Amino acid sequence: MKRHAGFTLIELLVVIAIIAILAAILFPVFARAREKARQTSCLSNLKQLALAEQMYQQDYDEVTGTYITSAPAGTTTDYTWIDLLLPYTNNTQIFQCASSDNGYRSGGVGHLGSYGANITDSGRTGLTGQTYLYCHRKVATINNPSQAILFADSNGTHYVRWVTGTNVTNNLNEIGGGIHNGGVNLAYFDGHAKWQSLSALKSPTAADVQWRDLP
């Protein structure tokens, strides 16, 4: 009679151990690859939002949008920059990052999403008498359009900012904390978008240019 060969218990355990080791090596790689794909999709969103902002500026005499409008008399809900740019995107999904739990939704101040507008106090007076960087500002008054942050991943609020005069680790409290492989995606006033590490965003030496747009 023929005997059927089979695995011994030791051989089976060795195979299982090898599979477990390979899984431990490959799963983090797959997770990083998936996050990299989400990061790329998010970067595309911000690029399109920056372009929508530029179209808005062309329609409004080269004046930027604003992180929030003032509610008209008799109403209780303001409009956020998301509401202002929606007619130029006609796509609510563009306001949601795949890595964020905060999608396009109604909030107490108009609509919210995964991204925030830069409302850092620039120390300069804009057209409305406010010093917030993204608040109905003349495009010609922007000193560093290729370096000044316009939009960024946020923690669900409709704005992000550098808080001057506080400990660096407490700054950027509204920004998405390293949501994309230890960093966040950003859009700039000149229309381009890129990823930047969280440590670079917290650097005090870069705050004046990229957050406050000072000369």
Image (spheres, helix red, strand yellow):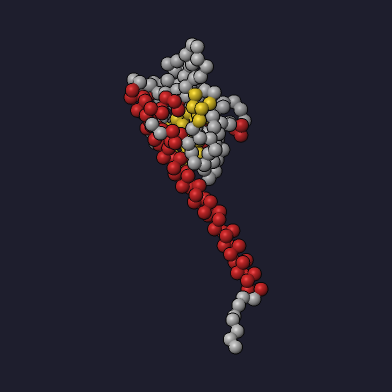
Residue 120 visible somewhere in the drawing: no
**Figure check: 204 above or below 9:** above
**Figure check: 127 above or below 164:** above
Image position, residue 189 (x, y; %):
41, 30
| Residue positioned 54% across, 58% down in the render | 26
Residue 163 visible somewhere in the drawing: yes
Image position, residue 33 (x, y; %):
49, 51
Q: Quadrant of residue 148?
A: top left
Is 83 positioned to the left or the right of 203 in the image?
Answer: left
Can you say which quadrant of the picture contains the C terminus? top left
Is 9 positioned to the left or the right of 153 in the image?
Answer: right
Image position, residue 6 (x, y; %):
60, 77
Q: Quadrant of residue 65?
A: top left
Residue with the most extreme right position: 9
**Figure check: 127 above or below 172:** above
Residue with the most extreme top position: 73
Residue with the most extreme front position: 1
| Number of marks in the rendered image | 0
State the residue in front, 146 or 34.
Answer: 34
| Residue positioned 50% across, 35% down in the render | 103
| Residue positioned 42% across, 16% down in the render | 127
| Residue positioned 38% across, 21% down in the render | 63
Is 168 positioned to the left or the right of 35 in the image?
Answer: right
Can you say which quadrant of the picture contains the N terminus? bottom right
Image position, residue 205 (x, y; %):
52, 33
